[in-house]
């Protein structure tokens, strides 16, 4: 066998030659006008303003708006009495804890005291917040929301639940540490008694 190819055989390449895309065509764009042209009045027609005072059929709103700091009347515009429900504040997109809640640092200890009192009165410390009895949980939430009116506008009670969850864990940890200290003291006392 010879190393040079014979004239009878044709050589076939195993790799195809690189393919290139055709070059894009450049079409010159001739613009007879300038790039910026101010609009003339005939091209830019504005609609006439609508007079809403004459088209309004119900004229029960006051002519001057009140201050946002004045209390809301309990009377609805059409003469019925009742409370107007505020827009509820949704919970943040992240997992809410007391540390990242954004509540003022000066007021936070007071919030925790209120929640701790509700936990000690209504909730069972041996269970997490999700396993608490519904009536006890509702009473604890109501206590917190009565003491902190800002939390009444939270969707699904997320502010009160955040405080309750935090204080439930805090009370449970405190009691567990106290129990651990007590058992350690009793074991130490028993050991000393055996040594004597």
Image: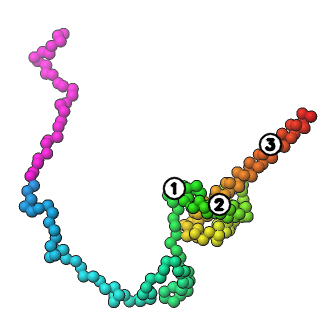
Mark 1 = which residue? 94
Q: Marks 1 and 2: which is nearer the front? A: 2
Q: In which quarter of the image is the N terminus?
A: top left
Q: Which residue is drawn at 73% across and 64% down?
A: 121
Q: Where is residue 138 in the image (x, y as percent from the top left)?
A: 65, 67
In front: 70, or 83?
70
Q: Residue at x 13, y 42 (%)?
A: 23
In front: 4, or 164?
164
Q: What stretch is highlighted in magenta?
A: 1-28
Cα distance between the residues tagged 1 and 2: 22 Å
Question: Which of pointers 3 and 2 lies earlier in the amino acid sequence?
Answer: 2
Secondary-structure class at tag 1: loop
Question: Does residue 115 appear in the picture of this structure?
Answer: no
Mark 2 = which residue? 109
Mark 3 = which residue? 184
Please say whether residue 7 is one of the residues in the magenta stretch. Answer: yes
Q: Residues within 10 Å of mark 2 (few under 14, many from 20)?
A: few
Secondary-structure class at tag 2: helix
Cα distance between the residues tagged 3 and 2: 31 Å
In front: 42, or 92?
42
Question: Which of pointers 3 and 1 lies earlier in the amino acid sequence?
Answer: 1
**Which is the main secondary structure of the residues drawn in magenta?**
loop
Q: Which residue is drawn at 52% across and 77% down?
A: 69
């Amino acid at each position: 066998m010879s190393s040079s190819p014979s004239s009878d055989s044709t050589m076939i390449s195993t790799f195809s030659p690189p393919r290139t895309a055709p070059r894009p065509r450049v079409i010159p764009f001739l613009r007879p006008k300038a790039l910026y042209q101010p609009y003339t009045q005939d091209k830019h027609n504005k609609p006439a303003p609508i007079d809403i005072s004459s088209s309004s059929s119900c004229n029960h709103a006051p002519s001057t708006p009140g201050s946002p700091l004045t209390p809301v009347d309990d009377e609805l515009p059409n003469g019925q009495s009742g409370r107007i429900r505020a827009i509820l504040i949704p919970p943040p997109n992240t997992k809410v804890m007391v540390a990242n809640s954004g509540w003022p640092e000066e007021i936070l200890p007071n919030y925790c005291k209120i929640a701790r009192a509700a936990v000690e009165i209504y909730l069972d410390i041996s269970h997490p917040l999700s396993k608490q009895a519904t009536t006890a949980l509702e009473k604890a939430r109501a206590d917190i929301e009565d003491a902190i009116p800002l939390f009444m506008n939270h969707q699904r009670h997320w502010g009160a639940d955040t405080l309750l969850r935090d204080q439930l864990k805090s009370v449970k940890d405190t009691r567990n540490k106290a129990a651990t200290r007590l058992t350690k003291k009793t074991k130490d006392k028993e050991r000393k008694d055996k040594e004597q």
